[in-house]
Amino acid sequence: MSILPDDIRYEILSRLPVKTLLRFRVISRFWLTLIGSPNFIKSHLKQSVKTKNNLNLILGCVSPGIFNFSRLCRLDLDSVEGDDILQPVEINDNPLRHHLYKNRIWGTCDGLLCLSNTKEAILSWKPSTRIIVGHANHSNIHQNNRSIWVIDYIDIVVLWNPSTKKSIELPSASIEIKDERRFDKYRTYGFGYDNTNDDYKVVRVAVLLDVVINYEVKVYSLRSNLWHTADKFPNQYPDLSGIGNSVAGGAMHWISIDADLNRSILAFDLGLETYRVIQQPEYRDCEFYSHLDSFEGCLSLTCLYFSGNVDVWLLKQYGGDNEYWSRLITLSEQNIPDTSSYFLRCIVYSKNGKKVLLYMGTDLVWYNLETRSLEDIRFHSEDDSLEACLESLVSVGVAEAG
């Protein structure tokens, strides 16, 4: 390959799988420097996005007789597009594989996955402020600081590159809401790229259900390896039941409800940390469940009408003057199985762009965009966690984001 011009050699390398490139790094210092350079990493990522040659489906695995709910498996897109029986391959270097509870896949961006699991912890609760103030440890558990030690479950959140097998565990972030110990609380995470600051961000939205519903928004930066509290959108609160991996266009999205129970779609910009309300599509009926997600870089809105019909919308020209909703999929009640217990999700386009892979409950099904119909079920999973993840060389090293 050394006799080839540099630009041709660069082009060839950018099309290779990550596993091959990692082996090439040990050949010489030149190869190590080239493959690890930011420009090459971005070029390789761009090529993978374009061709889908290095795309895998990451899903939760459940094995009969094995009391382990934290396993993850992989399916490559080529096998899903084929006709053979699908055989998921377990990912042995999953960083949360030794935990007891089920892993949550919160999102994927540029080949990185945001995962969480749960562990039991002793926390310090101050009655004077009614706020969790931190974790107990050997240095403070014997101090008389008028705190009450309580046992609770906290999230372990990691960013993980399955291709390079590198991961980072995020620092713990307390929920600093008054009376946080007394009532039910819900939280969700969003993960995406902040183009303004060339950084990867995790956003946690925590909601406390009380007579008056309260919530907080915290943001983690990979560059700084720190959490901070962001401003809230005034006079409204999030409905976390209607969002999935809802980061698109550099913003995290959720359904927001005001005092009159009016619902709106809110966008939280990852870089500027500002809010805007997104105009909603023209629904075919006024009674429906909705679910926000992301699909191929677009914000996706699934509407499950009480009539049994389903619409899937994509927000096009995001953030521009001509931003609009385009209906991608319409399914009638007669053409789909019972969807009362789940939301239909769009996962990925086929390589030829003529089909969309849907996750319906725990079934993987192709939707043909030309015939506007569902094809046969390709795979049935025992778990509802699934995300499409590109192979990439993107680092999870602190201060190396982007």
Image (spheres, rainbow, N blue to C red):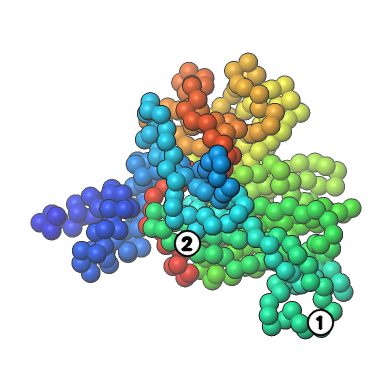
- Residue 49, how many percent across, how many down? 39, 45
Q: Position of residue 219 (x, y in %)?
A: 62, 63
Spot occupied by residue 366 in the image (x, y as percentages of width and height): 48, 27
Which residue is pictured at 72% across the width and 69% down the height?
Answer: 122
Viewer can see residue 70? yes
Which residue is at a point 63% across and 15% down the rendered structure image?
334
* Three-letter code for the amino acid on which mark 1 is drawn: Asn
Query: Looking at the picture, how far across and down is residue 197, in whole percent?
Result: 51, 64
Quadrant location of the C terminus in the rendered image: bottom left
Residue drawn at (33%, 60%) of the image? 39
Name, please, the residue furthest toward the right: 211
In the picture, measured across the screen, residue 385 lies left or right of residue 148, that is: left
Indicate which disc residue 145 carries.
1
Q: Closest to the observer: 372 or 58?
A: 58
Which residue bears the numbered disc 2?
167
Q: Residue at 69% across / 41% down in the picture?
A: 242
Sequence order check: which comes first, mark 1 or mark 2? 1
How many numbered discs sit on the rendered protein? 2
Element assignment for label 2:
strand
Eyeballing the image, is 153 above or below 135? above
Number of residues whose C-alpha sits closer than 10 Å to that of mark 2, classed few (under 14), some (14–19) or many (20 or more): many
Can see residue 387?
A: no
